[in-house]
Image: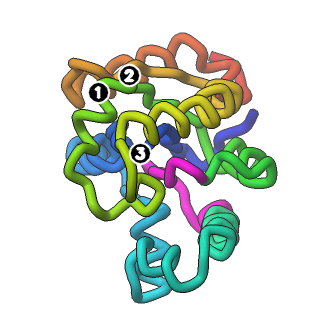
């Protein structure tokens, strides 16, 4: 895989830390941060939960695909956080791999439930018991995240600096494979 544009692409379940870590990296390393959900909200001039409510999930997933295509055309030297459901479409998985080094930020279900317990912005978590929702969605998504990821980092009980250093170490160790060239 070639990553001549030097992008890090974070995937993972909602609440795993993609956006927060991405912002931390952009403040501490010379990279620009983008969040696909924020990008969509800005272009649509409305929140994701409103898009879900008025247009439905399929419409939103179509917007995600358009967004990742745009990012492929425009972005370099960036940290990109994508919505938890974006990698579910096979088309999007190919686009993500082309966009940069795909990193799965993995967190346990207990950690996710703790982080998401009072979140009211995520339409897929609305309604019944959050623990059941997180478990059911993780059962659907975890294998996809693991299959597409070139790097998997467990985030529980780690600082942003520890996570970033781990990512950096893995990239250096796998440089010829991840960057499509020689060390």
- Residue 109 x %, y %: 38, 26
Magenta segment boundaries in residue numbering? 70-85
Near mark 3 (Cα within 10 A), the count class, few <14, some 14-19 or many ≥20, is many
- Residue 59 x %, y %: 66, 76
- Residue 92 x %, y %: 72, 53
Q: Secondary structure at mark 1?
A: helix
Q: CA distance from mark 1 to mark 2?
A: 5 Å
Residue 79 in magenta stretch: yes
Please name the residue that numbered disc 2 is placed on: 108
The reply to whether residue 70 is visible in this rendering is no
82 or 143: nearer the eye?
143
Q: CA distance from mark 3 to mark 2?
A: 12 Å
- Image quadrant in which you'd find residue 162: top left
**At x 21% / y 18%, what residue is drawn?**
157
Identify whether 138 is placed above or below 6.
above
Identify whether 28 is placed above or below 157.
below
Near mark 2 (Cα within 10 A), the count class, few <14, some 14-19 or many ≥20, is some
Please name the residue that numbered disc 1 is placed on: 111
- Residue 67 x %, y %: 61, 69
- Image quadrant in which you'd find residue 68: bottom right
Q: Quadrant of the N terminus?
A: top right
**At x 33% / y 27%, what residue is drawn?**
164
Q: Quadrant of the C terminus?
A: top right
Question: Does the residue at mark 1 contact the one at mark 2 (Cβ under 8 Å)?
Answer: yes
51 or 132: nearer the eye?
132
- Image quadrant in which you'd find residue 179: top right
**At x 37% / y 17%, what residue is drawn?**
166
Please name the residue that numbered disc 3 is placed on: 14
Q: Secondary structure at mark 3?
A: loop
Residue 170 in magenta stretch: no
Q: Going by the image, does 149 lie left or right of 11?
A: right
């Amino acid at each position: 895989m070639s990553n001549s544009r030097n992008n890090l692409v974070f995937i993972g379940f909602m609440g795993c830390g993609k956006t927060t870590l991405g912002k931390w990296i952009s403040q501490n390393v010379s990279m620009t941060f983008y969040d696909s959900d924020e990008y969509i909200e800005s272009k649509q001039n409305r929140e994701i939960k409103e898009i879900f409510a008025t247009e439905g999930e399929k419409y939103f997933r179509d917007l995600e695909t358009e967004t990742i295509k745009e990012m492929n055309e425009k972005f370099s030297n960036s940290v990109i956080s994508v919505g938890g459901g974006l990698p579910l479409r096979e088309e999007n998985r190919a686009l993500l791999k082309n966009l940069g080094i795909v990193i799965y930020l993995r967190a346990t279900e207990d950690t996710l439930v703790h982080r998401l317990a009072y979140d009211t912005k995520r339409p897929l978590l609305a309604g019944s018991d959050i623990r059941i929702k997180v478990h059911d969605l993780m059962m659907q998504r975890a294998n996809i995240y693991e299959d597409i990821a070139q790097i998997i980092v467990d985030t529980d009980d780690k600082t942003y600096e520890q996570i970033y250093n781990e990512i950096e170490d893995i990239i250096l160790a796998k440089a010829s494979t991840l960057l499509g060239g020689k060390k």
